[in-house]
Image (tube, rainbow, N blue to C red):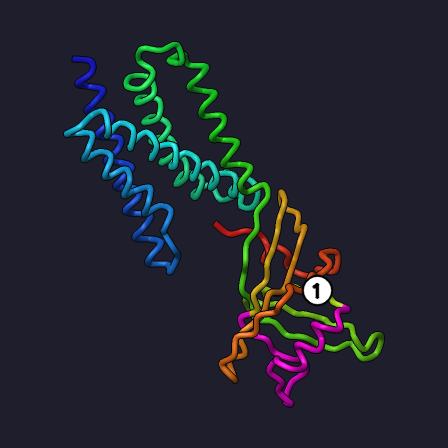
């Protein structure tokens, strides 16, 4: 009788996670975001629960692995909120719900189906396993590499240094940051490939791709990879990324911080 109730609880929890996954996928598509990871996790959970109903031995392992994926993914999300968006309490609730469901599933399957006849059934092993997943999730946003896209204007500083460039990156008129560079090669690439408009200062490089490396809210590396000249329809990819000294960054540094 006890096993019957545990099986029903496991199915109910799995269905709740699947419903949650569908809601997240729908909202991601609505806001033009890529829901690839959640789609994979939701699909694996759906496959697992279907197989579990007909074949308990195979189904339990699929659900078990899927629950681990959900736990790591949402501890990663939680680490992002703690590091970069701590005041967003509404989003924390959205993260805690799947975490609670996935951890409960993990514990049920581990305790009643996998470790039923071995000593690793003890709670210290369960808690140890969850702690490892927490660390994996938090470390992933402790050191993060992302490629971001910005509109960029390059200005030559002819008064102090003919090779000095001021770079202005923008995602909105009042949402900008600046850096400086003394790279002769970068200057020559910009003069050759950027968009120049006589009615305004500077050289315009739309859709500039920037590689950003952050470590616990600190920007440790910044590289310019290329841009898209929309007037000539030409995509410029630098053979070697141009490194920018992070100490020259001025303005809204939060623009460079990781997104989730």
Of the 4 image quadrants, the one containing the N terminus is top left
For the residue labelled by badge 1, is the local secondary structure a helix, a strand or a loop?
Answer: strand
- Magenta residue span: 182-207
The structure residue drawn at horizontal position 44% and vertical position 36%, both measured from the top left corner, is 72
Q: Is residue 223 above or below residue 136?
A: below
The structure residue drawn at horizontal position 34% and vertical position 32%, both measured from the top left corner, is 65
Q: Quadrant of residue 165?
A: bottom right
Residue 60 falls left or right of residue 32? left
Q: Is residue 21 above or below residue 239?
A: above
State the residue position of label 1: 179
Q: Nearer the viewer, residue 237 or 144?
A: 237
On the image, the x and y values in percent for residue 176 come to 62, 65
The structure residue drawn at horizontal position 51% and vertical position 34%, both measured from the top left corner, is 136
Residue 226 falls left or right of residue 37? right
Q: Quadrant of residue 82?
A: top right
Verify whether residue 39 appears in magenta.
Answer: no
Q: Nearer the viewer, residue 167 or 47?
A: 47
Residue 169 falls left or right of residue 49? right
Verify whether residue 195 appears in magenta.
Answer: yes
Label 1: how many residues lie within 10 Å, few (<14), some (14-19) or many (20+)?
Answer: some
On the image, the x and y values in percent for residue 57 come to 23, 24
Q: Quadrant of residue 222?
A: bottom right
Q: Residue furthest right?
A: 160
On the image, the x and y values in percent for residue 52 come to 20, 29
The structure residue drawn at horizontal position 64% and vertical position 65%, both measured from the top left corner, is 240
Q: Is residue 182 above or below residue 83?
A: below
């Amino acid at each position: 009788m006890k096993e019957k109730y545990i099986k029903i609880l496991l199915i109910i929890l799995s269905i709740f996670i699947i419903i949650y996954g569908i809601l997240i996928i729908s909202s991601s598509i609505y806001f033009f975001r890529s829901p690839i990871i959640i789609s994979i996790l939701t699909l694996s959970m759906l496959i697992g629960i279907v197989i579990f109903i007909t074949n308990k031995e195979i189904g339990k392992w699929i659900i078990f692995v899927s629950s681990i994926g959900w736990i790591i993914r949402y501890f990663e999300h939680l680490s992002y909120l703690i590091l970069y968006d701590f005041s967003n309490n509404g989003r924390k609730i959205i993260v805690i719900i799947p975490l609670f469901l996935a951890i409960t599933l993990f514990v049920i399957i581990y305790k009643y189906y996998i470790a039923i006849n071995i000593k690793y059934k003890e709670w210290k092993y369960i808690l140890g396993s969850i702690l490892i997943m927490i660390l994996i999730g938090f470390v992933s946003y402790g050191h993060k590499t992302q490629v971001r896209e910005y509109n960029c204007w390059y200005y030559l500083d002819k008064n102090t240094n003919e090779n000095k460039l001021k770079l202005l990156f923008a995602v909105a008129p009042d949402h900008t940051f600046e850096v400086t560079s003394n790279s002769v090669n970068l200057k020559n690439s910009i003069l050759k490939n950027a968009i120049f408009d006589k009615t305004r200062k500077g050289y315009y490089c739309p859709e500039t791709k920037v590689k950003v490396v952050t470590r616990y809210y600190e920007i440790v590396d910044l590289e310019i990879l290329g841009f898209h000249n929309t007037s000539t329809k030409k995509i410029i990819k630098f053979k070697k990324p141009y490194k920018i000294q992070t100490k020259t960054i001025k303005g809204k540094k939060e623009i460079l911080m990781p997104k989730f």
